[in-house]
Amino acid sequence: MNREHAIGVFDSGIGGLTVVRALHEALPDERIVYFGDTARLPYGTKSATTVAGYAAQITEFLLARDVKMLVVACNTMAAVALPVVTRLASVPVIDVLEAGARAAADRAGARRVAVLATHTTVSSGAYERAIRAQRADLTVISQACPLFAPLVEEGWVDHPVTELAAREYLRPVLAADVDAIVLGCTHYPLLSPLLARLVGPGVVLVDSARTTAARARAALAACDLLRAPGGAAPVHRYYVTDVPPRFREVAALCLGHPLPDVQLVPW
Amino acid sequence: MNREHAIGVFDSGIGGLTVVRALHEALPDERIVYFGDTARLPYGTKSATTVAGYAAQITEFLLARDVKMLVVACNTMAAVALPVVTRLASVPVIDVLEAGARAAADRAGARRVAVLATHTTVSSGAYERAIRAQRADLTVISQACPLFAPLVEEGWVDHPVTELAAREYLRPVLAADVDAIVLGCTHYPLLSPLLARLVGPGVVLVDSARTTAARARAALAACDLLRAPGGAAPVHRYYVTDVPPRFREVAALCLGHPLPDVQLVPW
């Protein structure tokens, strides 16, 4: 394996750029190759079979582009397609769901944890399994929030409609008196200020992007695959299957700075 | 052309089943072959190029299945991909956008008309062109309502969140003092009771499903392609690219009765 190779990061769309942002901070010397399946998003309302098929196609696309690691930056793919990805990949695979589950389980004192995620992620039960594999004593409740991603895409990150939808989704979560809430979809961290206001200071919001980046860093170090610092500035590449209206605004919101040029893959 | 051949109806998902329902009522003897691209929906937030590519693929799929007419039951495809469909098709093509535009223009006394539709449909300007081609004196204002389809998919057809979103979308529409509102997406008729309450009795809601069915009937009659009544009961076929969670509930809501078995096309 070549240390100069890139980290391949993929998502159903551009929400995964929140993970790229965390990777840039944790691993500033690493090259990133990003794939966002913007033509076929969202995945969170689709069947596990369809999501797994798309995940396999993306994995093969990235493996053909000399990557030394894959980061599954989409909770839905991590929930239902991880076996497909790891079977195809000969490189280390890190995923946001495992990272989020560990971050939740590592919270000392937590007894009850909620997971907010898409329909398909919730139906899979993957978060419950991953959290309880770390801490069998934790109670995990899951809540599908299928409108959160469209609301973020609409740019309504702090809007009365979003607040009303959030109150509806959070009602059973708050009634269960949880200590922590895992934001189990890469769009959801953009709603953190609103959600924090609604849940109050006693409940911690767990965003898996930073944990994912920390795990990626540790795995690269363990495999002696970290790119040497001080060389040429890393060049990143971005592939998407569609460039829809409002693409650049939402991408910049997720990435934290304007998105460079993207290459279109016409699937 | 064979009168026994089916009418091919297609949509990005299952909202187009509202058109199938109207076709069943207007043309009870006709066979329907339906295609819903449930794996890649929604189209209304995607680029015109991507939508046109998908429309071409679906058109070829249906033409290979012996259809005597095509009905584009998706406003977004009708707005940006109709030239692609008509170029490929050797059969009559009817579309919901033209039908909706005519229904709006035919309203005697109307002076100002609003169109509610997806981002991609609104950006195309197709409704304005189609309405003003009929009645150049009409003022047309367009409003993108990208959250309506996800809200319907969530089953929140009469819900405080949907009402608040609708109030937001309708504000500029009502301020423009329109006489009629075209429901320019096949999901939106399911919100008719809520919308009617918000706009009041002075504003007519135009749903293109029935007009589309009437135009399909007239075109079949003009081409001498109506299937003879009194023969074997027509057999309908339904193809979809994904069978996601909640698929049957939403399909039944659109179709007005439970959806028969579907065949999965793994695109």
Image (spheres, coloured by chain):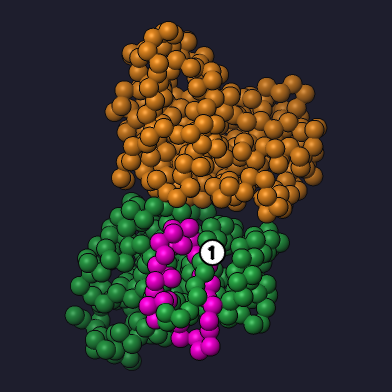
Chain colours: A green, B orange
> How many marks can you see?
1
Q: Is residue B5 left or right of residue A251?
A: left
Q: Is residue A243 visible?
A: no
The quadrant the N terminus of chain A occupies is bottom left
Of the pair B12 and A176, the residue shown nearer to us = A176
Which chain is disc 1 placed on?
A
Residue A88 falls in which quadrant of the image? bottom left
Left/right placement of residue B31 relative to residue B176 reads left
Residue A106 painted magenta:
yes
In percent of width and height, residue A233 lies at: 35, 83
Q: Say few, some or many: other residues with alpha carbon within 10 Å of mark 1 (under 14 / 14 to 19 / 20 or more).
A: many
Does A177 sit left or right of A43 as displayed?
right
Residue A168 placed where, x, y %? Answer: 65, 61
Q: Position of residue A43 (x, y in %)?
A: 42, 56
Which residue is the site of mark 1? A143
Compared across the picture, whether B2 is left or right of B12 comes to left
Picture coordinates of residue B209, whole percent (x, y)? 57, 28
> Residues in magenta?
A105-134
- The residue depicted at 36 percent of the width and 56 percent of the height is A48
Q: Amino acid at mark 1?
A: Gln
Q: Nearer the viewer, residue A132 or B252?
A: A132
